[in-house]
């Protein structure tokens, strides 16, 4: 019986270690997701600032070779 309890304690210890590692991984991934969301937002803002006005259509423009 004592050997079985020891085996369960060892398994529990490994499970706790694995859970802690998974928590650290999820935390790091969430930080990366947050950084990527900020970068995408910044890029969208830059694109909106650089985009031509809405009334302008590329089909109305004369190609550069004319």
Image (spheres, rainbow, N blue to C red):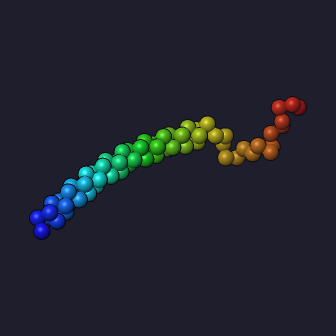
Q: Residue furthest left?
A: 2
Residue at 26 percent across and 57 percent down: it is 15
Using residue 31 as the reference point, say whether residue 37 is left or right of it: right
Using residue 53 as the reference point, say whether residue 43 is left or right of it: left
Q: 22 or 13, which lies in front?
A: 13
Residue at 38 percent across and 48 percent down: it is 30
Q: 15 or 25, which lies in front?
A: 15
Position in image of residue 7 (x %, y %): 19, 61
Would you say residue 59 is visible in this rendering? yes
**Count of numbered tags:** 0
Residue at 25 percent across and 54 percent down: it is 14
Above or below residue 65? Residue 43 is: below
Q: Residue furthest top?
A: 65
Position in image of residue 43 (x %, y %): 54, 40
Position in image of residue 36 (x %, y %): 46, 43
Q: Quadrant of residue 57?
A: top right
Using residue 4 as the reference point, say whether residue 22 is left or right of it: right
Position in image of residue 4 (x %, y %): 17, 65
Residue at 88 percent across and 31 percent down: it is 66
Would you say residue 45 is visible in this rendering? no
């Amino acid at each position: 019986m004592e050997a079985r309890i020891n085996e369960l304690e060892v398994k529990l210890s490994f499970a706790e270690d694995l859970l802690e590692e998974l928590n650290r991984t999820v935390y790091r991934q969430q930080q990366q997701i947050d950084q990527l969301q900020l970068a995408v937002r910044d890029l969208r803002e830059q694109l909106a600032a650089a985009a031509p006005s809405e009334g302008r259509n590329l089909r109305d423009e004369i190609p550069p070779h004319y």
